[in-house]
Amino acid sequence: MAFTLATWNINSVRLRAPLVEKLMREEAPDVICLQECKSPVEKIPAETFRDLGYPYLVARGQKGYNGVAVLSKRPIEDVGEMDFAALGHARHVGVRLENGVVLHNFYVPAGGDVPDRAVNEKFGQKLDYLAEMRDWFHGDRPEKAILVGDLNIAPREDDVWSHKQLLKIVSHTPVEVEALGAAQEAGSWVDITRQDIPEGRLYSWWSYRAKDWNAADKGRRLDHVWATPDIAGAAHSSRILRDARGWEKPSDHAPVFASFDL
C-alpha cells in the first residue's frame, strides 16, 4: 500500500476550508492531517471534503481552540486520543490505516511567549505535555507507526532562520529541544523529513507579523513527520509546500508531505 500524507496546521478549518479544498484538488494526498482546527467536530465541513474524494474523517475538536483531524481517501479506524498533561484539550487523535499502520496526529502546546515555567504557566504545560509523550512511548513502545503534526518546536540549528537569535525564543530553546528529543528517542522515532532532506535550512512556519514573509524568510520548522524504524525505510519524497503560505488568507504554516511504500 503506497500512500502520501500531508500534515498542516490550518489555523481554523472552517475559515480556511477553501485552502484545504485547494490542497485536495492540486496535491491530492491520500491522507491529510490537520491541526488547530478551532472547530467542534460536527461543524467541520465534512460534506465538502467528502465530495472532493475524502469520505473518511476522524477528529477531536473544541470550540475556537486546538482541534485535530484526519481526512482520508481510504478507510481509517479511530484508535482514540491521549490527553497529555491533563489539559482537556483536543490535541491528539490516532487512526489505523488499512495496512495496519497507526498514525498519530499531534498538536503540541505552543508554550506562550516566556520560556520560564515559573512565570509562564503555558510553558510549563508544554514541557509537561512533552514529558508525558516521552513516558507514553517508553511504556508502550510504538511499532509500525507514523507521528505527524505541529510539534511547535524547531529542533535543529538549520530548522530556524537564526539559531543564535532564537535560543531564548519559545520553540527553539534548549530545554524544549531536549524535551522533544527525549520524546523522539523514547519511541525511536525517525525524523522522516530530515531523513529525506538531511542538509540545509528548512521551514514550515512564517509569522504573520512579517510584512513580506517570503522576502524576510524568518521561518521555523515546527511541523514534523516521524516514523518508527520498522517502516522509516519505506518513506520517501518529503517536501514542504512553501507556496501555500502565500495563498489567499493563508495559515501561517505550510503543509509538510511524505510518501510511504508499504
Image: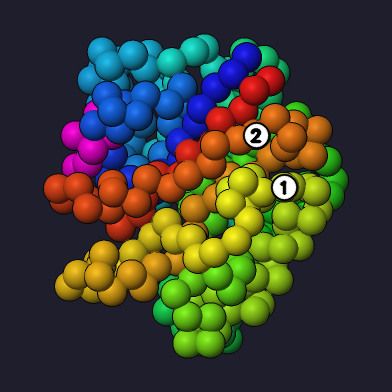
Relative to 8, say whether 52 is above or below. Answer: above
- Indicate the position of residue 221 as horizontal and vertical percent values: 49, 61
- Indicate the position of residue 88 as horizontal and vertical percent values: 51, 50
Viewport quadrant of the N terminus: top right
Q: Which mark is residue 165?
A: none
Q: Nearer the viewer, mark 2 or mark 1?
A: 2
Which residue shows up at 47% across the image and 26% down it?
A: 31
Please provide the residue range marked out in magenta.
Answer: 15-21
Q: Is residue 218 visible?
A: yes
Q: Is residue 59 visible?
A: no
Relative to 198, say whether 74 is above or below. Answer: above
Prevalent SS, magenta region: helix
Tell which residue pokes out farthest to the left in this image. 248
Q: Is residue 204 left or right of residue 247?
A: right
Q: Residues within 10 Å of mark 1 (few under 14, many from 20)?
A: many
Comparing 232 with 12, the one in front is 232
Q: Amino acid at mark 2?
A: Ala
Which residue shows up at 53% across the image and 87% down it?
A: 164
Which residue shows up at 35% across the image and 29% down it?
A: 27
Q: Is residue 136 left or right of residue 249?
A: right
Q: Residues within 10 Å of mark 2 (few under 14, many from 20)?
A: many
Which quadrant would residue 255 be assigned to in this image?
A: top left
Comparing 15 with 168, the one in front is 168
Comparing 89 with 228, the one in front is 228
State the SS at label 1: strand
Q: Which residue is mark 2?
A: 235
Q: CA distance from mark 2 to mark 1?
A: 10 Å
Mark 2 and mark 1 in contact? Answer it, CB < 8 Å: yes
Tell which residue pokes out farthest to the front in this image. 199
Q: Which mark is residue 190?
A: 1
